[in-house]
Amino acid sequence: ILGKHSAISEYQVTQDPAGARITVCLTDPVDVGDLAAEIAHALTRSGLEQPSVVVEPAASIPRLATGKLKRFIPLEPDARPPMQPV
């Protein structure tokens, strides 16, 4: 969704226990509420129950020391929910 949106020049997804916080750099105006709802719907279809998605516009996204953009930041190990026995 994010990589195909014409108004999004770059993005970074930070995973959290309830869903994701997404920082986007925009080239044109976007309704971030609609974008968050679209992403939440896709996460629901993927099996995440009632995902929380927050989309925040930004002028820029911090880069790694190498100059590369880290697009996905996973949960910290201690923030992950415990595994359920199968």
Image (tube, rainbow, N blue to C red):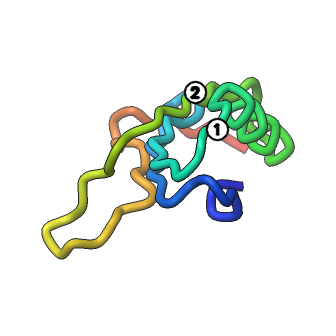
Q: Quadrant of the C terminus?
A: top right
Determine the residue located farthest toward the left in the rendered image. Answer: 65
User: In terms of secondary structure, where does tag 2 sit?
Assistant: loop
Give the residue drawn at x 48%, y 46%: 24
Residue 63, horizontal then vertical, whole percent: 24, 61
Report whether 67 appears left or right of 11.
left
Report whether 17 appears left or right of 75.
right
Give the residue drawn at x 66%, y 40%: 85
> What amino acid is labelled 2 in the image?
Ala
Nearest to viewer (mark 2 / mark 1) = 1
Residue 46, horizontal then vertical, whole percent: 80, 48
Rendered position, 32 above or below 39: above
Nearer to us in this view, 81 or 4: 4
User: In terms of secondary structure, where does tag 1 sit?
Assistant: loop
Determine the residue located farthest toward the front in the rendered image. Answer: 28
Residue 44, horizontal then vertical, whole percent: 80, 37
Nearer to us in this view, 37 or 34: 34
Nearer to us in this view, 27 or 50: 27
Answer with mark 2 or mark 1, whichever residue precedes in sequence: 2
Q: Answer yes or no: do the residues labelled 2 and 1 have beta carbons within 8 Å?
A: no
Residue 78, horizontal then vertical, whole percent: 33, 35
Residue underneath mark 2: 18
Rendered position, 5 above or below 65: above
Residue underneath mark 1: 30
Determine the residue located farthest toward the bottom in the rendered image. Answer: 66
Report whether 49 appears left or right of 79.
right
